[in-house]
Image (spheres, rainbow, N blue to C red):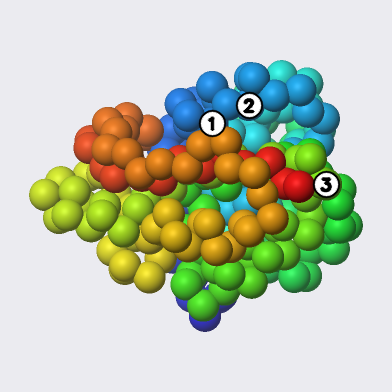
Amino acid sequence: MAKEEAKKWDDRYREKEYAYGIKPNVFFKKEIEKLNISKILFGAEGEGRNAVFTKTLGHDVVAFDISHEAKKKALKLAEQNGVTLDYKVGELPNLGFKPKSFDVIALIYAHFPSIIRQEYHKMLDTLLKPGGYIIFEAFSKNHLKYKMENPKVGGPGDLDVLFSIDELKSDFKNYNIIQLEEKTIELDEGIYHIGQGSVIRFIAKKQ
Ligand SMILES: C[S@@+](CC[C@H](N)C(=O)[O-])C[C@H]1O[C@@H](n2cnc3c(N)ncnc32)[C@H](O)[C@@H]1O
C-alpha cells in the first residue's frame, strides 16, 4: 500500500515543474506569519513550498513525506532560497520523532490514505507540545463535484481521503478550536491546483 502510494507520488514529482508551485499556500502563509513559534513539523510536505518559505522566516523546520522524489525537489527549492531543510522520507511511525517536540504541526493538503488517517493524526497529536498549534488546509468531501466540473483543480477522487469537519473534531479532541470551516475557494497553486475547490481550514491550539 505505502509502496504503491509512494510510487504514484514519485511519478508525479519526477516531472520538471513543481506540482503545486513554489510559493507557500496562501492560508498557511497568513497563519504562520501570525504565530510566535520555533519548531514546526510539516506532514506530507511534498516538494517543500511551505517548509522552505517557513525556513526563510528563521524557524526550525522539519518535514516528512513518503516520496523520495518530493524530497529531491524540496531540497532543490531550499537551495534556491538559500536555506537547508531537515526532510525525512518514510512512514511516520518509523521516523523517530520525539513526543511533545514541536510547536506547530502543518498539514497542507496532507491527504493520507484513509486507513491510516486517524492513526497518523493521533501520532501527530503526540508530537505536538501542549499549547502548540495545528494549521490545516485540505479538500473537503464536497470537493468531488468541483473536481468533476474542472479536473484541473485536482485533489483526491476518493471520498474516504477527503475531509469533513466532524472528522477533524473527532481526530483532534483535546484542542481549542480557533477556526474550523468549510469554504469554497479559488486555487492557483502550480499546475495541479487550479480553479474553484471546497476546502476545510482548521486552526487549533492543543490544551
Ligand atoms: C497533495 S500532495 C501535498 C503536498 C504538500 N503538502 C503541498 O501542499 O504542496 C499530498 C502529499 O501526501 C504525501 N503522502 C501520501 N501518503 C503519505 C504518507 N503515508 N506519509 C507521508 N506522506 C504521504 C504524498 O507523497 C504527497 O506529497
What residue is disc 1 on?
Answer: 28
Q: Which amino acid does label 3 sit on?
A: Lys
* Three-letter amino acid code at the position of disc 1: Phe
Residue type at mark 2: give it: Ile
Ligand 1 is within 8 Å of the C-beta of the residue at disc 3: no
Along the viewing direction, whichever of 157 and 183 lies nearer the viewer: 183
Q: Which residue is drawn at 48% across and 70% down?
A: 113
User: Residue 168 location in percent, x, y?
Assistant: 51, 57
Please state the horizontal and vertical placement of residue 142, each as a whole percent of the image.
26, 55
Question: Residue 191 location, x and y as percent?
Answer: 32, 38
For marks 1 and 3, the one nearer the N-term is: 1
Q: How far apart in space, not on screen, are marks 2 and 1 (Cα)?
A: 6 Å
> Which residue has dot 3 on it?
129
Residue at the left extreme of this rendering:
149
**Which label was assigned to residue 152?**
none
Q: To which quarter of the image does residue 158 belong?
A: bottom left
Q: Would you say 201 lies left or right of 64 here?
A: left
Query: Please, is residue 57 above or below residue 42 in the view?
Result: above
Inter-mark Cα distance, 1 to 3: 20 Å
Q: What element carries label 3?
A: strand
The image shows a total of numbered marks equal to 3
Mark identifier at residue 32 = 2
Q: Which of 33 and 148 is in front in this view?
A: 33
Position of residue 152 in the picture relative to residue 109 (left or right): left
Residue 161 seen in this snapshot = yes
Q: Position of residue 107 (x, y in %)?
A: 57, 47
When the figure is inspected, residue 23 is found, relative to residue 105, above or below; the finding is: above
Whether residue 49 is visible here, answered yes or no, is no
For marks 3 and 2, give the one nearer the viewer: 3
Q: Residue at x 86, y 52 (%)?
A: 100
Q: Mark 2 vs ligand 1: CB under 8 Å? A: no
| Apparent side of residue 122 relative to residue 178 in the rendered image (left or right) | right
